[in-house]
Amino acid sequence: MKTITFQIIYILLLGCSSAISDLHPACIDFSSTNNIYPQSTPYGNLSAGTYKKISDAVTFPDCVQACCEDNKCNIAFLHNTICFTLHCHSYKLCKPLKRKGKKYQNSLVVIVRMPG
């Protein structure tokens, strides 16, 4: 079941990646999935930076769009249907950390802008 879920998420990500690159010019090029990390969270968890909950963004493209539109946003983080944009303190704290377990099956980190 885990493999099937991951494959479905990966296919959806591939389909969305080209649409996301057209969303906002400030976004990193999403023509590949190099900046998309399924089943991951920011390495520093809550201490990674300043989180902002985006209530009206409940899909992957909406969450990334919200981050693209915020010049201070580095990471779009989606857990289930809850979107957070993240202004990182450093790359080390925000780098995606692959997680195991059912709790993280619907977690997704997208690097929109590299933290400075």
Image: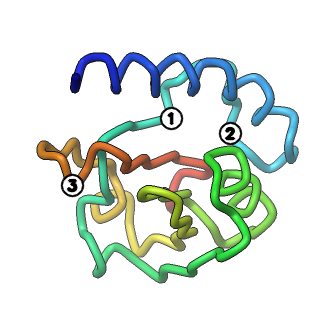
Residue denoted by label 2: 28
Label 1: how many Cα within 10 Å (few below 14, some 14–19, many 20+): some
Q: Amino acid at mark 2?
A: Ile
Residue shown at the point (61%, 49%) measured from the top left:
112
On the picture, is 31 further left or further right than 24? left
Q: Position of residue 109 (x, y in %)?
A: 44, 49
Q: Position of residue 1 (x, y in %)?
A: 22, 22
Label 2: how many Cα within 10 Å (few below 14, some 14–19, many 20+): some
Residue shown at the point (36%, 60%) measured from the top left:
94
Disc 2/disc 1 C-alpha distance (Å): 8 Å
Q: Do tag 1 and tag 3 residues touch (Cβ < 8 Å)?
A: no
Disc 3/disc 2 C-alpha distance (Å): 28 Å
Q: Is residue 106 above or below residue 20?
A: below
Residue shown at the point (33%, 52%) measured from the top left:
95
Q: Is residue 15 above or below residue 87?
A: above
Q: Furthest-left residue in view?
A: 101
On the picture, is 23 further left or further right than 105? right
Residue denoted by label 3: 103
Q: Secondary structure at mark 3?
A: helix
Q: Nearer the viewer, mark 3 or mark 2?
A: 3
